[in-house]
């Protein structure tokens, strides 16, 4: 299902988190659970992965992660502030100490000049520390490719957090 490169990245990430005794949660919008899916492809991931939140709708982001309604209205779901709030909400609503969130526009529609198809915001949080953030502009390379590149970028950002 996933490339050997992604699987190797996931194995490395899980090993690093395991070595530090950390639990992980994911908060995913445009990736629809692919990050959690990749991590669970790795045998033994259950001792690191606590849970995954698939929060595709704004209502789900609000209810499951505590993303403020006002933030969603002001900045939109595809924004740095919402990505950060999603990652921080995943920690608050789980037993995890680290988390990653992804929100973006995978296309083929839904893009605007300000927020084009391929724009993805990723945040990685660690309890009690500053949240890391990355904006990706993959371009209109196709829905599946945007989603897979988002997973790869999320793993990279998580690795920086560890």
Image (cartoon, grey):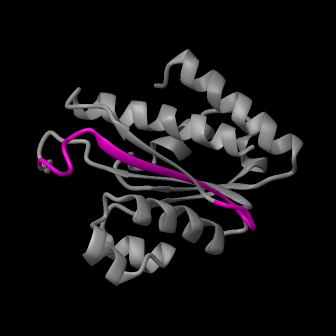
Left or right of residue 44: residue 131: left
The boundaries of the magenta stretch are 113-130
> From the viewer's perspective, is residue 45 above or below residue 84?
above
Q: Is 103 in front, or is 81?
A: 81
Quarter of image, res 149: top left
Quarter of image, res 131: bottom right
**Residue at point 75% right, 67% down?**
128
| Rendered-image quadrant of the C terminus | top right
**Residue at point 63% right, 43% down?**
158
Task: Give the percent coordinates (x, y) of residue 155.
Answer: 58, 37
Left or right of residue 28: residue 23: right
Task: Give the percent coordinates (x, y) of residue 113.
Answer: 12, 47
Residue farthest to the top, as pictured: 4
Q: Is 119 in front, or is 107?
A: 119
> From the viewer's perspective, is residue 59 above or below residue 103?
below
**Residue at point 78% right, 44% down?**
17
Q: How many marks?
A: 0
Task: Give the percent coordinates (x, y) of residue 145.
Answer: 32, 28
Q: Is residue 118 magenta?
A: yes
């Amino acid at each position: 299902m996933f490339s050997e490169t992604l699987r190797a990245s996931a194995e490395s990430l899980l090993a690093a988190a395991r070595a530090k005794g950390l639990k992980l949660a994911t908060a995913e919008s445009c990736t629809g659970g692919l990050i959690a899916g990749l991590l669970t492809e790795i045998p033994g991931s259950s001792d690191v992965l606590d849970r995954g939140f698939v929060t595709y709708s704004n209502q789900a982001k609000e209810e499951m992660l505590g993303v403020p309604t006002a933030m969603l209205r002001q900045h939109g779901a595809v924004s740095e502030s919402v990505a950060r709030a999603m990652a921080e909400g995943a920690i608050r609503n789980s037993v995890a100490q680290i988390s990653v969130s992804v929100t973006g526009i995978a296309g083929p529609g839904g893009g605007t000049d300000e927020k084009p198809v391929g724009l993805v915001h990723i945040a990685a949080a660690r309890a009690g520390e500053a949240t890391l953030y990355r904006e990706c502009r993959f371009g209109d390379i196709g829905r599946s490719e945007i989603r897979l590149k988002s997973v790869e970028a999320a793993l990279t950002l998580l690795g920086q957090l560890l």
